[in-house]
């Protein structure tokens, strides 16, 4: 079964902490608006078509069926495939956000019996058992409060299961129906158990890897001893794999490298051949049917050895940018290798692990934080995602209204995270991104990208001795000496950006030069270690930097972008919300000017809303000063009463046709004003408290409004809510059975053609595509 999800258009803002809510003010419907009937319900068919891929944790194959696979995610979901991984079906959602499903076992005696171990890092996850192929699950009461980081089943007696937890080791002798904690408390260091393996000959011999060292028992877990001989102290043991042909031959991966023993742990020798920077090996597998073939899944790619892991036998066969969490091989198909990865989902090799390609039909596990539909091309949709585990993010384009997606990231740095997308109002080919690295733009509708402050290519150097204009020669030049005050400001800026230079002293010494080089590399500037004009510009430092009218470059996080006009000159301009405040620019390639709020307000700005009819009025949301407003184009600011100032503000939307109608989503509640912000009402009928991250007004029926909720705990929270009477009453529209892969919602958008398709950006299921029912939307009176 394919999981399909909707498409949305929205600018997502960053959200932060929470606070109590204020009182409410009742209000009547806007007298200028007609009372409209429901313009059409939305389908329960919420399709997830992508963007494909995402994070895959545990990946296993059914020992009795080489076409049946299961995998778990880091947000409490299970997926399955019945065709060798070509297509994936959403199987189950444990409805526990941030739940890592790191271990799945298919019982070899009955393929419908599944065991799952979960955790939330140090917090509890639990053990679950299904006897109907994963449709229904029973949670173990003994392990309900445990963080399970490992799980294994005995080959010689499949009734025996061993679970490793943050607090020790548990054993079940009845296929997981009940559990008993083993006496590990007398063995120093035997906690934080991350890996396990049972000798295939007997249930008495068990290996356990902890955050510190490996351990072994020969009496079923009653007594334990450290087996550390040959292993570097304090080695986190990620995985343990027993040779199916020789149980005394064991391979273990650790943070200090890969080790093997040929005498059951009596002593260990380091396996050489994988570079030290790639040795964080999360999973290791000795091929079940090809002797001597060993696979290692690392944080820097997939490695294979055809000679038992001996030195000089290892070869990396994927990009080293690939992080691998799991490896699956069925013995009857020895050349077919599957890997579960971060960001790229499931990948498969049909040549023994030499070449891999994605196989993610029906699966999207992506955090879709921004969606925007192209206003001129009805089927063209843009979506930005955040990589949950590795940092950075991706940018995708759909040309068929969200049915399929392709990445579009040419010239984007790998660690770029997009927080907002803005299509220029005058030139639809021009798209701006607000990112963690400043403002980026594309001149070709997302085909290629560059920072708006990108440095021009240097002009060719004249031949030696030939004079340039101005009398300088073509010999290598040193940077123009800067005043000490400028160097000091640059040092302060470097420290603030996380590039430590120690105590700023105005002298460009070794620490300053090294920090400059790192900063320049990160910002894609020429790495010179010198305070050239471009570096000073990106740092926001110049001889005029103390001037409030100084033009600066935004090279750090920009959470929101919007387009408006200057209230006095009517000249088009951009506004940018940043951690340092609100900035404006008439030409972002030249720079930005700050619109200061004053010292009494938090400068950290999360979102912006403007009024096209009254450009002098701008609302901004902050992290800890609530909502601020200016009515004179940014010259003076005041805090808006009625919205808690200690609650981070996620989003503000002003109805463009009824600008006195303003909607605000905060980390804890939703607010409405029908009088330009003088008075506010909290929530509305049937709208719960929540983390309201996105607000969408139907341009053809302005009483139809949607809000997305990113707050969820267990079965409670999340979802998309809709009103058809301007916010007086609300109804949740995501499927009633709450069986979506992800219910935490971060972005909303309409298709640009007729607003009969809703796009919904989720926390861990990509973009949902939601069609309206047979009734189409009515046009509202203007």
Image: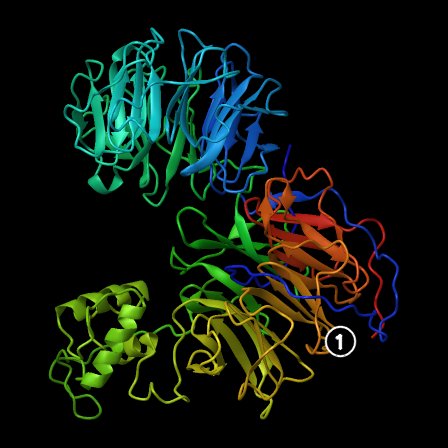
Left or right: 542, with 350 as reference point: left
**Up-down relation of residue 622 to residue 416 (above or below):** below
Which residue corresponds to the image point at 44% horizontal and 70% vertical from the top-left?
579
Does the image show residue 305?
no
Query: Which residue carries the number 1 mark?
Result: 658
Left or right: 80, with 41 as reference point: left
Point out residue 743 in the picture as x, y percentages from the top left corner.
62, 45
**Up-down relation of residue 245 to residue 637 (above or below):** above
**Up-down relation of residue 97 to residue 184 (above or below):** below
The answer to which image quadrant residue 210 occupies is top left
Q: Secondary structure at mark 1?
A: loop
Point out residue 615 in the picture as x, y percentages from the top left corner.
63, 84
Which residue corresponds to the image point at 67% horizontal and 43% vertical from the top-left?
47
Q: Nearer the viewer, residue 216 or 284?
A: 216
Point out residue 392 in the picture as x, y percentages from the top left corner.
41, 54
Quarter of the image for the N terminus: give it: top right
Left or right: 637, with 122 as reference point: right
The answer to which image quadrant residue 613 occupies is bottom right
Which residue corresponds to the image point at 27% horizontal and 33% vertical from the top-left?
236
**Up-down relation of residue 231 to residue 571 (above or below):** above
Which residue corresponds to the image point at 33% horizontal and 79% vertical from the top-left?
537
């Amino acid at each position: 079964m394919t999981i399909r999800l909707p498409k949305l258009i929205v600018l997502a803002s960053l959200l932060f902490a929470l606070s109590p809510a204020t009182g409410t003010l009742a209000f009547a419907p806007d007298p200028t608006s007609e009372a409209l009937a429901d313009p059409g319900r939305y389908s329960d068919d919420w399709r997830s078509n992508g963007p494909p891929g995402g994070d895959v944790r545990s990946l296993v194959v059914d020992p009795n069926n080489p076409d049946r696979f299961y995998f778990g995610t880091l947000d409490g979901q299970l997926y399955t495939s019945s065709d060798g991984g070509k297509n994936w079906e959403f199987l189950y959602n444990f409805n526990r956000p941030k739940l890592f499903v790191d271990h799945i076992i298919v019982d070899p005696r009955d393929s419908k019996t599944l065991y799952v171990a979960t955790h939330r890092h140090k917090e509890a996850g639990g053990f679950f058992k299904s006897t109907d192929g994963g449709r229904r699950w029973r949670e173990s009461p003994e392990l309900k409060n445990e963080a399970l980081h490992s799980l294994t089943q005995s080959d010689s007696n499949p009734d025996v299961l061993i679970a490793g937890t943050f607090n020790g080791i548990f054993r079940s002798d009845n296929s997981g129906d009940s559990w008993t904690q083993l006496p590990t408390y007398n063995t120093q260091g035997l906690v934080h158990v991350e890996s396990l393996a049972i000798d295939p000959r007997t249930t008495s011999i068990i290996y356990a890897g902890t955050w510190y060292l490996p351990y072994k028992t020969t009496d079923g877990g009653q007594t334990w001893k450290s087996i550390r001989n040959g292993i570097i102290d304090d080695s986190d043991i990620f995985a343990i794999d027993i040779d199916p042909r020789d149980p005394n031959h064991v391979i273990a991966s650790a943070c200090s490298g890969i080790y093997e023993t040929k005498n059951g742990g009596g002593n260990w020798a380091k396996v050489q051949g994988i570079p030290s920077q790639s040795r964080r090996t999360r999973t290791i597998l000795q091929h079940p049917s090809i002797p001597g073939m060993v696979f290692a899944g690392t944080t820097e790619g997939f490695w294979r050895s055809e000679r038992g892991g001996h030195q000089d036998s290892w070869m990396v066969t994927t990009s080293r940018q690939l992080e691998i969490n799991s490896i699956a091989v069925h013995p009857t198909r020895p050349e077919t290798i599957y890997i579960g990865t971060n960001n790229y989902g499931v990948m498969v090799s049909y040549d023994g692990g030499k070449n891999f390609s994605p196989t993610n039909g029906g699966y999207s596990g992506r955090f879709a934080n921004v969606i925007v539909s192209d206003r001129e091309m009805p089927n063209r949709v843009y979506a930005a995602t955040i990589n949950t585990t590795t940092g950075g993010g991706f940018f995708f384009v759909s040309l068929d209204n969200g049915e399929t997606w392709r990445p579009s990231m040419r010239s984007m740095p790998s660690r770029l995270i997009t927080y907002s997308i803005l299509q220029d109002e005058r030139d639809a080919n021009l798209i701006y991104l607000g990112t963690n690295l400043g403002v980026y733009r594309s001149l070709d509708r997302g085909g290629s990208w560059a920072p708006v402050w990108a440095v021009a290519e240097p002009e060719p150097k004249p031949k030696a001795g030939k004079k340039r204009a101005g009398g300088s020669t073509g010999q290598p030049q040193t940077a123009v000496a800067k005043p000490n005050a400028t160097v000091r400001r640059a040092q302060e800026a470097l420290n603030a950006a996380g590039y430590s230079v120690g105590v700023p002293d105005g002298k460009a010494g070794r620490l300053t030069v090294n920090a400059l080089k790192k900063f320049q590399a990160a910002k894609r500037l020429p790495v010179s270690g010198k305070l050239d004009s471009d570096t000073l510009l990106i740092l926001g430092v110049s001889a005029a930097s103390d001037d409030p009218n100084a033009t600066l470059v935004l090279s750090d996080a920009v959470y929101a972008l919007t387009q408006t006009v200057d209230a006095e000159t009517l000249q088009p301009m951009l506004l940018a919300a940043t951690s340092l405040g609100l900035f404006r620019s008439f030409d972002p390639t030249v720079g930005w000017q700050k619109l200061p709020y004053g010292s009494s307000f938090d400068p950290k700005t999360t979102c912006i809303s403007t009024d096209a009819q009254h450009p002098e009025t701008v609302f901004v949301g902050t992290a800890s000063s609530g909502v601020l407003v200016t009515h004179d184009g940014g010259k003076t600011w005041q805090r808006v009463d009625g919205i808690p100032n200690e609650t981070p503000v996620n989003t503000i939307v002003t109805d463009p046709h009824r600008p006195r109608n303003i909607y605000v989503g905060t980390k804890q509640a939703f607010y409405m004003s029908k009088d330009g912000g003088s008075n506010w009402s909290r929530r509305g009928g049937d709208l719960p408290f929540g983390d309201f991250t996105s607000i969408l007004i139907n341009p053809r029926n302005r009483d139809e409004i949607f809000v997305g909720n990113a707050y969820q705990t267990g079965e409670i929270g999340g979802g998309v809510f809709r009103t058809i009477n301007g916010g007086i009453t609300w109804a949740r529209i995501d499927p009633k059975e709450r069986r979506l892969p992800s219910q935490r919602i971060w972005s909303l958008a309409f298709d640009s053609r007729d607003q009969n398709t809703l796009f919904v950006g989720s926390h861990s299921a990509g973009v949902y595509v939601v069609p309206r029912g047979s009734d189409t939307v009515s046009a509202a009176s203007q």
